[in-house]
Image: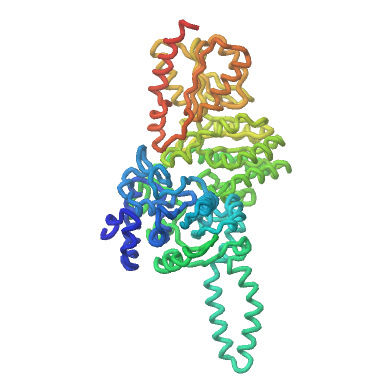
């Protein structure tokens, strides 16, 4: 590595010539493949922006100039060029470097990002602040074409013309989000991509007609006038131009010299300008180029073959959900599925292949997905929207006004609920119980294992009538419990009936709750163990059951405020029951950092040992006072 370890700041980058920058790009790609093969992370997206990132830092004066990375999972090259190469040893690990931009991590990270379609709004705000302060710096938003399906993008573009500061929007076009792009914006960008080819054809036609005697040049001029309006409409980026945003490109995003030349000129432009660059996701690593979806987010893998180090792929909750939905859809033609650019991640890929006419991938547009589902539901269809918990947050208003207010039968299959691990604060699914529980007409279920998930999906589709959410975690399914009882509204499952101490578990936290129960029995206690099943509404029968219990402990992988334990305390308070101690094991008022699930449970007091000791300590300290 001749240059890689010499570049500890963007200033060092500016000392290199084009030839050296090209060698640096190769070194960065080699480093990324080798490093991420050991730690896991987002590979394909970062391989695609190597030259683009080099050109940006060569031309800009960061951190005075600002770069906002949309989503942020493609910021690894940026981190390398800003002196954080050593951080890749603990990339996305507990107490290690984040896989996303974080302002507290580096002065070169201008804005925290983790969800898509936010960069232009943030960049416009920073550019406007510069203008108000009389600061003459450049602000750059780097946004992928997949993120262009998000509605926030168009709200930002609608307002971008207002700034007279240097705002550069780089549209990084690799024809991918995580999955292949869908919708009209994808088609529109494909037309823009054709611009260079169109111009090449136009030049060839001109040469041919110019060699036709007498009438050749005249015919070409007539054709040229006819085609000019078409060229403007299709190739010059008229949508952006009509919004008052100068449009340049598309250009080759892997040509460092061209990128530097164009960016140098764009820094002189006042007001917003959009630069359309074409890149290849996974560039430089053949396995990632061939399979960019598989190499979007990867675990450890063999560099030579690209094969994952973990070949024993266990069944996940996403798999179990997708399998059951296919079975139910075969029985009921009214069932339709909706995804927001996450077919593979939510287990809907096979459904899409079997029932393409009933599978609607709306792109990165969660708000639209919810209201779209409401429209389907009001016409008698049963839409199942499969979505990650963290992304469902983006559609809160639509859930309230368009689904729940009308009491429509929409099924929310909430994947990645609870701790997701290495992606950190922006992706932990620990808020869904809280922001859904207080919405009228909403019912919330949480399964403890695969069988319960599949039975709840059947119940949600064929028995329930109204808005209903089923939340389940990322990862391998818990072993199926053959003794599981039928789902009955809104009943909890009483697993063991004891006295004095009650443990109520939410969803897949049941495995921890069961172990805590077993340890308490060994210690001589006789606790009651309950699988909540229904987070909302609370099973009113529990209020009577717990009359003989002085201490009630709830366990959930959600924030405490507004979670199951909070709602249970509220119900007891309404019944004027004041002689109970109700304690919730949940995440307190905090954003949960990155790390493995077990590490985070230990850090935040949700592991088996901490819960068991806390129950015994609290019970022994307070039982004589009650």
Q: How many marks?
A: 0
Q: Quadrant of residue 440?
A: top right
Q: Quadrant of residue 486?
A: top right
Outermost residue to the right = 379
Left or right relative to 249: residue 604: left
Image coloring type: rainbow
As drawn, 149 above or below 551: below
Outermost residue to the front = 134
Outermost residue to the left = 2
Outermost residue to the bottom = 214
**Depth order, front residue of 515/116:** 116
As drawn, 239 above or below 31: below
Q: Position of residue 180 (x, y in %)?
A: 53, 55
As drawn, 219 above or below 121: below
Residue found 63% across the figure and 68% down from its top: 233
Q: Position of residue 540 (x, y in %)?
A: 62, 18
Q: Position of residue 105 (x, y in %)?
A: 38, 43
**Depth order, front residue of 479/541:** 541
As drawn, 147 above or below 187: above
Residue found 59% across the figure and 56% down from its top: 162
Residue found 47% across the figure and 6% down from its top: 625
Residue 235 showing in the rendered view: yes
Residue found 48% across the figure and 13% down from its top: 501
Left or right relative to 91: residue 374: right
Quadrant in which the N terminus is drawn = bottom left
């Amino acid at each position: 590595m001749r240059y890689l370890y010499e570049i500890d700041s963007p200033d060092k980058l500016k000392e290199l010539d084009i030839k050296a920058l090209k060698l640096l790009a190769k070194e960065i790609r080699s480093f990324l493949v080798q490093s991420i093969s050991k730690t896991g992370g987002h590979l394909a997206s970062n391989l695609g922006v190597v030259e683009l990132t080099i050109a940006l830092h060569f031309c800009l004066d960061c951190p005075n100039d600002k770069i906002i990375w949309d989503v942020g999972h493609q910021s690894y090259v940026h981190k390398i060029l800003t002196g954080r190469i050593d951080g890749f040893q603990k990339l996305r690990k507990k107490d290690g470097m984040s896989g996303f931009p974080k302002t507290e991590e580096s002065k070169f990270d201008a804005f925290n990002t983790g969800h898509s379609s936010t960069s232009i709004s943030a960049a416009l705000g920073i550019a406007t602040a510069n203008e108000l302060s009389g600061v003459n710096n450049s602000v750059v938003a780097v946004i992928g074409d997949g993120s262009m399906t998000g509605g926030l993008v168009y709200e930002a573009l609608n307002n971008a013309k207002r700034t007279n500061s240097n705002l550069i929007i780089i549209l990084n076009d690799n024809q991918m989000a995580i999955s292949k792009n869908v919708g009209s914006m994808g088609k529109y960008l494909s037309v823009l991509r054709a611009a260079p080819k169109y111009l090449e054809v136009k030049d060839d036609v001109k040469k041919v007609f110019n060699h036709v005697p007498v009438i050749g040049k005249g015919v070409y001029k007539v054709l040229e006038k006819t085609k000019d309006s078409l060229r403007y409409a299709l190739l010059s980026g008229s949508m952006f131009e009509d919004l008052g945003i100068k449009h340049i490109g598309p250009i080759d995003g892997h040509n460092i010299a061209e990128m530097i030349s164009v960016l140098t000129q764009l820094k002189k432009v006042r007001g917003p300008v959009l630069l359309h660059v074409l890149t290849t996701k996974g560039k430089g690593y053949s396995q990632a180029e061939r399979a960019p979806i598989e190499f979007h987010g990867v675990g450890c893998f063999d560099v030579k073959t690209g094969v994952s180090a973990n070949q024993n792929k266990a069944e996940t909750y996403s798999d179990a959900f997708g399998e059951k939905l296919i079975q139910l859809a075969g029985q009921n033609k009214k069932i339709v599925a909706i995804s927001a650019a996450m077919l593979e991640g939510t287990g809907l890929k096979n459904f899409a292949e079997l029932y393409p006419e009933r599978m609607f991938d709306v792109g990165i547009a969660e708000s639209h997905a919810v209201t779209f589902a409401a429209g389907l539901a009001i016409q008698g269809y049963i839409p199942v929207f499969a979505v990650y918990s963290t992304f469902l947050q983006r559609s809160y208003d639509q859930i309230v006004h368009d689904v729940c207010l009308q009491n429509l039968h929409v099924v929310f299959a909430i994947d990645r609920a609870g701790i997701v691990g290495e992606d950190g604060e922006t992706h932990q699914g620990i808020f869904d119980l809280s922001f859904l529980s207080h919405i009228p007409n909403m019912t919330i279920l949480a399964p403890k294992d695969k069988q319960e998930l599949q039975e709840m999906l059947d119940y949600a589709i064929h028995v329930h009538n109204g808005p209903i959410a089923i939340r389940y975690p990322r990862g391998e399914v818990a072993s199926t419990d053959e003794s599981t009882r039928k789902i009955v509204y809104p009943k909890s499952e009483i697993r063991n009936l004891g006295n004095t101490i009650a443990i109520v578990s939410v969803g897949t936290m049941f495995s921890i709750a069961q172990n805590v129960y077993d340890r308490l029995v060994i210690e001589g206690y006789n606790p009651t163990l309950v699988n909540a099943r229904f987070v909302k509404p609370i099973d009113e029968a529990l209020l009577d059951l717990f009359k003989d219990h002085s201490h009630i402990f709830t366990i959930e992988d959600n924030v405490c405020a507004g979670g199951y334990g909070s709602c249970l305390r509220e119900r007891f308070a309404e019944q004027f029951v004041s002689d109970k101690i109700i304690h919730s094991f949940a995440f307190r008022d905090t954003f949960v950092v990155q790390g493995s699930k077990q590490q985070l449970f230990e850090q935040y007091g949700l592991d088996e040992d901490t819960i068991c000791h806390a129950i015994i300590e609290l019970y022994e300290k307070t039982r004589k006072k009650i």
